[in-house]
């Protein structure tokens, strides 16, 4: 039996707004039909990574237990772009030959921008 990853889903307050942030950050279009309740990137075209955004009633309360690591050739430029789009810088790191910046999207979901 084979199990494969299909979609990463974000619980959020405004699915359409959060999908637009990730769409701009990743330079990938939001799928048609996006609303405040549900939105996606890459699902209609079946192109990974597929991201889904689903409105939930409760707000985020604690640190993410799982997060995305995104690779950027120019870390400083990628971080600056994320900040311009509405991300918040949480920390900068360097360890084991890698440099990365931990950020939070507009709803507080943590992610890392990484360069080797």
Image (cartoon, rainbow, N blue to C red):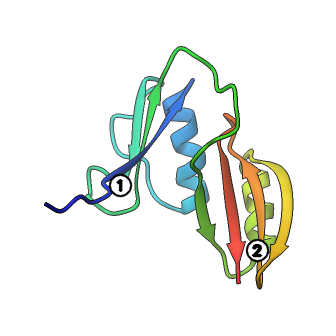
Residue visible at 64% across and 27% down in the picture: 60
Viewer-closest of 99 and 46:
99
- Is label 2 in a helix, a strand or a loop? helix
Q: Earlier in the sequence, mark 1 or mark 2?
A: 1
Judged left or right of residue 114, residue 23 is left
Mark 1 — residue? 42
At 84% across and 67% down in the image, what residue appears?
A: 93
Count of numbered badges drawn on the protein: 2
Depth check: give the residue in front, 52 or 84. Answer: 52
Residue 69 falls in image quadrant: bottom right
Circle 1: element type: loop
Q: Which mark is residue 98?
A: none
Label 1 to label 2: alpha-carbon separation: 24 Å
Q: Quadrant of the C terminus?
A: bottom right
Residue 25 screen position, x and y as percent? 61, 57
Instruction: Work out which residue is located at the far front of the displayed protein and give it.
Output: 1
The residue beneath circle 2 is: 75
* Image height of 103 relative to 34, above or below: below
Residue at image position (60%, 46%) is 21
Q: Is residue 116 left or right of residue 2?
A: right
Residue found at the very far left of the displayed protein: 1
In this rendered view, identify the residue nearer to me: 13 or 101.
Answer: 101
Residue depicted at x 77% and y 85%: 97
Q: Which of the 4 image quarters holds residue 81?
A: bottom right
Residue 53 drawn at (x, y percent): 45, 36
Using a 10 Å C-alpha cutoff, classify the residue at mark 2 as few (fewer than 14 neighbours), some (14 to 19) or many (20 or more).
some
Q: Position of residue 108 (x, y in %)?
A: 70, 37
């Amino acid at each position: 039996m084979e199990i494969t990853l299909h979609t990463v889903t974000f619980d959020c307050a405004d699915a359409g707004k959060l999908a637009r942030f990730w769409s701009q950050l990743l330079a990938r279009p939001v799928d048609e039909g996006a609303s405040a309740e549900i939105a996606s990137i890459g699902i209609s075209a079946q192109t990974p990574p597929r991201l889904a955004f689903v409105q939930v009633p409760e707000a985020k309360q604690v640190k993410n237990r799982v997060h995305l690591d995104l690779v950027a050739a120019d870390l400083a430029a990628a971080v600056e772009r994320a900040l311009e789009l509405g991300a918040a810088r949480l920390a900068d790191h360097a360890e084991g030959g890698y440099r990365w910046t931990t950020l939070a999207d507009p709803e507080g979901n943590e992610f890392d921008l990484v360069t080797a």
